[in-house]
Image (tube, rainbow, N blue to C red):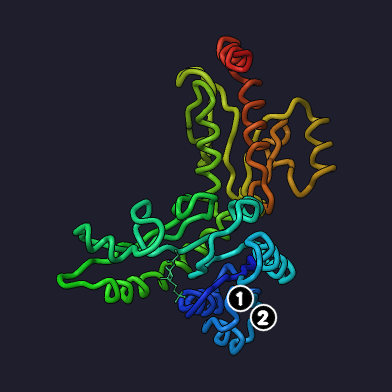
Amino acid sequence: MADKAKVAIFISGRGSNMAALLYASLLPDSTYEVCLVAANDPDAEGLTLASAEGVPTFALSHKGRTRADHDAAMEAAAKEAGAQYIVLAGYMRILSPEFVSRWQGRMLNIHPSLLPKYPGLDTHARAIEAGDSHGGVSVHLVTEELDAGEVLGSLPVAIRAGETADSLAERVRFAEHQLYPRVLSDYVSRGSDPGYLLEKVRALALSLPEAHERESHGSPGWRAGSEKSGKYFAYFNDQHHGSEHIALLVKTGSMDELLDLVEAQPHAYFKPAYYGASGWIGVILNRPGIDWDHVAEWLERSWRSVAPARLAKLINAAEDF
Ligand code: GAR
């Protein structure tokens, strides 16, 4: 199994979500480990629990510090602990835009409503007041706008007759403790999840003009041109022919180019069985730091090499526009 992702959890209070995340991380198949629990309140209850479980902690009050300074100190502690992700669990601080942008795509938050409904505070009271049938919880990526980043998962919780904000909050918390570890675990491991990688490649391949998908020898493939006479420009391979790679196969310009790339960047490219002989290169997708813009460039280049001239003109015209 790949190395576990290291996550720092930021809390402000009780830390029950932190505890759920921490204990889930101790299960044998967890994809992440908790390298730090940090709080903006040195008296946060959750810190004691984390210490008792042997997890390093960090606490720094935000009082008397600028937002930027406090964020920087929290961030420094996370980095020092080796965190690859920051997970907010009841961290009741607005973060500076600079901090948020440095962790874009690597910072998650849990929010007690079914987003996009009820960002901000008093979520349960607002759901009850509105007569909603359900409250709930969402886990989302953190962006500059409050509670507005991509929702990675959510769970509805029924609102009963006579419900109060407190009684609903209590039940929502059970749901939170189930949802957060699952979503975090899936999120940090999606770079090695063939289903996720295939969806990314498929979206890019099908965004090219007159591209369509057709299976080839059991693998998804994409062709340029008509259904009748189109030609393949890409294949998706999930650990084919004994390879450990999940890869995109695209056409290089020549065998020399293929061999040079494989030699210079063996972490990124390989020569696939069978296809390699006719100039197809394997672009390795299940690796840290994969650059999707680069994958898109390969797809476009490969598409151009097989697309009928009339279609290539379309793309050139779009670029000139
Ligand atoms: C949780 O209910 C979480 O959804 C909420 O704070 C609580 C923290 O509880 N977060 C927010 O309201 C964020 N805007 P915990 O400290 O026991 O995990």
In the picture, measured across the screen, residue 233 lies left or right of residue 128, that is right
User: 26 above or below 159?
Assistant: below
Q: Nearer the viewer, residue 278 or 48?
A: 48
Question: How far is disc 2 from disc 1 in space, using C-alphas?
Answer: 6 Å
User: Do the CB atoms of the residues marked 2 and 1 lie less than 8 Å apart?
Assistant: yes
Q: Quadrant of residue 127?
A: bottom left
In this orientation, does residue 93 appear? yes
Residue 67, labelled with which disc? none
- The reply to whether the residue tagged 2 has its Cβ within 8 angstroms of ligand 1 is no
Q: Quadrant of residue 252?
A: top right
Amino acid at dot 2: Pro
- The reply to whether the residue tagged 1 has its Cβ within 8 angstroms of ligand 1 is no
Q: Residue furthest left?
A: 161
Q: Earlier in the sequence, mark 2 or mark 1?
A: 1
Please, what secondary structure does the residue beneath circle 2 have? Answer: loop
Q: Which residue is mark 2?
A: 56
Please, what secondary structure does the residue beneath circle 1 have? Answer: strand
- Residue at x 60% of width, y 51% of height: 97
Q: Residue furthest front?
A: 64
- Residue at x 65% of width, y 75% of height: 60
Q: Position of residue 237 (x, y in %)?
A: 59, 44
User: 268 above or below 185?
Assistant: above
User: 129 above or below 265?
Assistant: below
- Residue at x 62% of width, y 31% of height: 299
Crowding at mark 2 (Cα within 10 Å: few <14, some 14-19, many 20+)? some
Amino acid at dot 1: Val
Q: Position of residue 136 (x, y in %)?
A: 32, 63
- Residue at x 68% of width, y 38% of height: 274
Q: Which residue is mark 1?
A: 37
Crowding at mark 1 (Cα within 10 Å: few <14, some 14-19, many 20+)? many
